[in-house]
Image (cartoon, grey):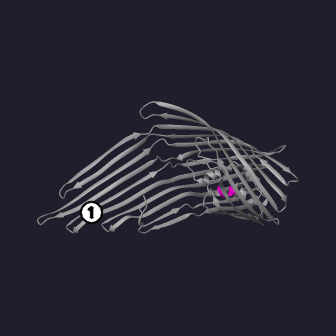
Amino acid sequence: MKKVLNILILLCILSAYSFAQLSTNMQTMINNLDMSAKKRATAGEFSSDSDKLNAKNVFDLNRIIFSAGYVPNLNSSSNQVIQAFFGIPLLNNTMYFGFAGAYSMSETRADYVNNETAIANSPNYLGKKVTNASSFAIRPVLKINDMVSIHYMIARGGTKSTIKGYSYFTNDRNYSVMTNSTANTDWVHEIAVGLMFGEMKLNIPIAVYIENNNYIKNYSKTISGNFINETNYSNTETIAGSTNGGYSPISLVLSPEFSMPLVSGPMTGITVGLVLGFDVYNPYKKTTSYTNTTTDSITSTSTASTTNRTTDNKSTVVTEDKMFGMDFDINFYPTLQWSLSDNRVQLIMEPKVGVKLNVSNRGNRTTTYKVDGNTYNGATDTPNSSENATISQNKISTVTTTPYVSLPIGTVLRPVNWFEFRAGLSYSLGFEMKNISTEYLAGGKSKKFSYGFTSSMELFTGIGFIIGEDFFIDLFLAAGTRFAGSTTTAGKSIFDIDAWGAQLSYRL
């Protein structure tokens, strides 16, 4: 099961929190992170080495490891993922270096040549469309000594699409060409320090979430003319475009986690986690559209020739102020473990209790209209310029508080030394309370309070084959759902498949 988490984490982000609108793959990883019992209900000791690289827990690694996996299906889609892990001890095992990486390639290309049916916003003559939805993540890890380790990660996810081509082409004086670009990509940089104090562990990850590549750009150029001869013709060139940038903050997230052994009956330890994230740079939402038209003409008679030029440049800019987001999460969970039938059956539970807090502010929206034109009749210029602005949209402040509980249960059945079966379930329940304060543009204020339950359930299963002492084959599947009732989270079909695939692990 841990193999699923490796893929999801490496594809997207490694901090247990998300900001704004993350991609589907990232959201899947976040949902699964709460099921830490699922992570621990893994195969043998050596099969968890790659997971320790990923979980910033490398202090007890002392052998060369190699692990590679393939996931032909992620998030009920055709996303295909390959992943690899490598680790080697250095300086007589006083240091340890590890490397983890994952890559999902997704790119489509389409060419258009004389399509009979025109498609909105797509070329239908001599055009092409390229969509790149590839994702990757790279994480090097270095254990400096028995007390300190350093971890770094860079990851990219999301989609970028570009369309280029002609809407029509009659001749070199009558045609229309377009270029449309759409991007919704996420970048994550994380650096973490792992500290070991006896049997107590402290991880301090600091991550930067960059989501400022969220935009839509449209551009078109249209030429139309009536050519008689060099002294009698007219030509009009129109360039139009728009840029729509969405909510694109750069966020800083601090998510320390402290764990310590505490043996009491089935309890083996406790873990306390804290997440604090906020926008460090939040550009206002900006929507810009423009139309620039230029018309040239020459009219000649037997006695005179007149040259005319008309320019008409129009633009619209929309800005939004006082945009800010902040998130806070504190949680606590013990680790409970039972072993039955001479360790042939293991059961692990990690009941988690926590509270989440989200703050979001939106301000007024200002729309600025600008006109800059000129008419030249061959002798004089007549300018035409104006600018005005209007303010719209109410100021809205939203505070959402969600106390929650999560109960992950994982089990491992190992009837013989060379085979094991793993299965588990995690159910989470939260009570979401939302306070919305509105300051109306026309005057006056209002407050609104709403509440509702949020819930989710995840299932997983896997089988493992142990060959000798150092080779392991793992097959896994994970599925999940979110039930109705959440005021912020969209539902899923029951038991959507999050991932399935295979992984091979070997150590020297």
Query: Is residue 487 something that shows in the picture?
Result: yes
Task: Confirm whether the magenta stretch covers residue 7.
Answer: yes
Q: Is residue 145 left or right of residue 305?
A: right
Task: Examine the rendering and report whether any part of residue 15 can be seen.
Answer: no
* Front one among 259 and 177: 177
The quadrant of the rendering that contains the N terminus is: bottom right
The residue most toward the left is 303
Specify the farthest residue to the front. 116
Mark 1 residue crowding within 10 angstroms, few (<14) / some (14–19) / many (20+): some
The rendered magenta stretch, by its main secondary structure, is classed as helix
The amino acid type found where label 1 is placed reads Asn
- Where on the picture, by quarter, is residue 406? top right
Q: Is residue 480 left or right of residue 473?
A: left
Q: Residue furthest right?
A: 342
Span shown in magenta = 4-8
Quadrant where the C terminus sits is bottom right
Residue at left 53%, top 35%?
Answer: 436
Residue 456 position by quadrant: top right
Foreground residue among 365 and 485: 485
Q: Is residue 494 left or right of residue 215?
A: right
Residue 176: where, in percent of width, then height? 35, 63
Residue in view at x 51 percent, y 62 percent: 131
The residue under the point 53% across, 58% down is 159
x and y percentages locating residue 397 in the rendered image? 52, 37
Residue 442: x and y in percent read 41, 33
Instruction: Give the secondary structure at mark 1.
Output: strand
Q: Is residue 353 left or right of residue 216?
A: right
User: Which x, y percent locates residue 424?
Assistant: 75, 51
Residue that mark 1 sits on: 235
Q: Is residue 395 above or below residue 504?
A: above
Queried whether the magenta region covers residue 502, the answer comes back as no
Q: Residue furthest top?
A: 444
